[in-house]
Amino acid sequence: MQDSDEFRSKAGSRPNRRQLLKGSAALGALALLGPLAARSWQHGENVMADTILRNGHITTLDVKNPEVTAIALAGGRVLSTGADKEVMRLASDKTHVIDLRGKRVIPGLNDSHTHLIRGGLNYNMELRWENVPSLADALRMLKEQVERTPAPQWVRVIGGWSEFQFAERRMPTLEEVNQVAPETPVFILHLYSHALLNRAALRATGIGRNTPDPPGGVIQKDKNGEPTGMLIAKPSALILYSTLAKGPKLPLEQQINSTRHYMREMNRLGITSVIDAGGGGQNYPDDYRVVRKLSDEKQLTVRIAYNLFAQKAGQELSDYERWVAMTEPGAGNTMLRMNGAGENLTWSAADFENFLEPRPDLRPTMEKELEPIVELLAAEKWPFRIHATYNESIDRFLNVFERVNGKTPFQTRFIIDHAETVDERNLERIKALGGGIAIQHRMAFQGEYFVERYGERAAKHTPPIQKMQAIGLPVGAGTDATRVASYDPWVALYWMTTGRTLGGLALYDKQNLVDRETALRLLTHGSAWFSGEDDVKGTLAPGQYADLSVLSSDYFKVPDEEIKQIVSELTIVDGRVVYAAGPFKEFDPPLPPASPDWSPVKHEPTPSMRHGDYARACHDSCASGCTLHGHNHLIAWNSPIPVQDKGGFWGALGCSCFAF
C-alpha cells in the first residue's frame, strides 16, 4: 500500500481510481487460489500444501464439511479440509506438518467493533485489571506500577474491568489511590461513568477549585470547593476522554512496539481480524501511520478494517467531505483496508450508555446535522456505522436514514452499533434498509447498573440477539474494547451463551441465549459481513483466508465458567504462525521486548495469562467453588463489607462457596 493510494490527494481532488485499486488485480488472483486449489486437487493437479495441521478436532463452520481432523493451507488460503489420510496427500517434502494432539481448532475470531488502532498506540502504557479477582490485588498492582513509572509519566487503568469482578464488590476509593500514589499521576477509568484522579493527576491536568464543569460532565468538589479527584460523566464521557488525552504520549518507535505487543495479545486470545470503529482523538490520516507502517513492513498480525470517526463537533460534515476526496472503502490490502464512516457521524447523535445516569435525550438539532452527512455517504456509496445504545435514539436515526434512502437508495451496508434496547419494530426497519447490528459484551460489565436503573425485566433482551437472528438480520459480535469493556473475546462468548455478567448476575432467560456454535459463528463469519468480507473470511472452507486458532481447551466441552479461561496455543493469520505457546511454543515468532522499560506489559502478566493465578486459596480438599470466587474464599471472608452477617450478604448474591 503506497501513500498516494490511500492517504494523499492532489489539490483536494480524488485520487485516480486506478491508483486507489491498482493492487486489486493481484488480490483478485489471490482470491482465486483457494477455489482453484480445491479444483486442482479434485482433478489430480499438482497443488501442494504449505502447511498441514492434522490429528485435531477442527470446527470449520463450513456447512458442507463442519467437523474434520485435518486442514491444508497454501498461499494464505485454506486448500482443503477432511480426514488426516485424505489431507496428507497434499503434503510434499516442503510442507510443514503440525500435529494438533487432539486440540480444538476454530476459525480465527473477528471482533466486529473494537478500537485496536487507538488501543495499540497506548497499550504499553496501560495497567490492565482484567481477570484480577480482588481489589486488594488491583491496588497492589497499582502500587508496584507507581514505583516503576518515572516522571512525568502517568499510571493509567483504562477500562476492561468491573468492580463486580472483585471479591470486595466495590471500586477503589480516592483515599486508597492517593495512599499508594502520592506523587505519580494516576488516572483510573470506570466504564463510561467515572474517572478517579489522584492529587498528582489533578495537578498534572490543571484541574483546580476554579475549573468549571464542562458540558455533560461534573468535576466533583468537596465542601471547601476543592476537586476530590472524581470526574463524573453526566452523561457524556467526553470529560473522561478529554482529561485522559492530556497525558504524555509514547514516541513513534514505542507506539510501533506497543501496537505489536497489543496485536500479539489479541493473537494470544485467538483474534485474527478486527473492525476498528475509530474513536475520539483518532485523527485520519495522522494516527494511522503506525498501522500503515506495520502493514508496509508486513508486521501486522491482525487483519484490520477501519472506519473513519468524525472528530470535531460542528465540523463533522467537513471531515467526511475531506475524506471522500482522499480515500474510499476497500482502499488498502487484505491486512489493512478502509471500511467506511463512523461510528461517530455527528456528535449530537452520541448516546453514551452510562447506566448510572438517565438515558440522554439527543439534541433537537441532531437530525439536521446527521442528514447531510448520510446523504453524502449514500451518494459516495460509503458504508457507515453509528453508535446507538437506546431504542429512542435508533428510532430517530432510522427516520433520517429512511428519508435519505428515499432520495438516494443505499447501495451498501450500514451498521447499528450496540443496540442494547432496540425493539422489534426498529429491527424490521433496519432489515428493510439493508442494515446489520454489531453487538458487544458491554452488559457483562454494566448489567448490574442496568438492572438497578431499569429493572430485571427490561434487561432480559439487552440486546435481543435471538430476535435479530430470527428475522434474518446480519449480526456480528465483538467487545467495544479497550476503554470500557475488555478486549477478551472469550468474555463475549461466555456472555452470549450464559447471559451472565462478570459478577455472576444472570441477565437473560433461555429465549435470549445462543448456543456455543451460534455464538462462535457471530464472532467469526457473522462479523465478516461488517467489513464486506464474508465471502473470504470466517469459515475454514477451501478458498477462505487461512486464519485459525488452536485452543487451550475445547470450547464445546468445557463448563460454562471455563469459557472465560480459554486462550489460543497456536494462532495462524494468512497462513503464517503469529503466536504459539504450550505444546507449540517452538513455533512462536520472536517479538522485541516491550518498551519503555517501565511498561506494565513488561512487568505484569497479560490479562489472558492471569487465569489460574489465584485459582485456589483454600485446602485442596475444598469442593465448594463458585462462579463468584472460584476457590478464593478467603479474599471475600477477609474483606470488609457493610453488614454484620457475612453469610447473609454473600448468600444474597447467590454465592454458595461458604456452605452456610
Image (tube, grey):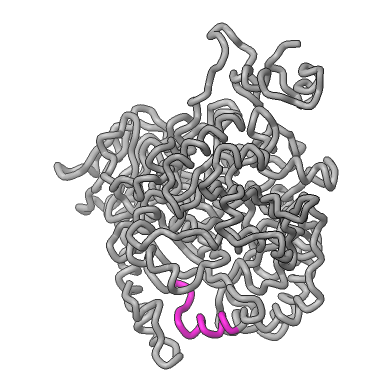
Residue at 33% across / 72% down in the picture? 1
Query: Does residue 43 sit above or below 161 in this rendering?
Result: below
Query: Does residue 230 sit above or below 563 in this rendering?
Result: below
Magenta stretch holds residue 327: yes
Q: Is residue 625 visible?
A: yes
Q: Is residue 618 left or right of residue 389?
A: left
Q: Residue furthest front?
A: 224
**Whole-percent x, y for residue 81 in the image:** 36, 43
* Range of residues picked out in magenta: 318-330
Residue at 45% across / 34% down in the picture? 609
Q: Quadrant of residue 99?
A: top left
Q: Is residue 333 left or right of residue 407?
A: left
**Whole-percent x, y for residue 184 in the image:** 51, 47
Magenta stretch holds residue 135: no
**Whole-percent x, y for residue 41 in the image:** 27, 50
Number of on-image labels: 0
Q: Is residue 515 visible?
A: no
Query: Does residue 159 sit above or below 332 in this rendering?
Result: above
Nearer to us in this view, 433 or 82: 433
Residue at 72% across / 70% down in the picture? 349
Q: Quadrant of residue 242?
A: bottom right
**Whole-percent x, y for residue 213 in the image:** 73, 64
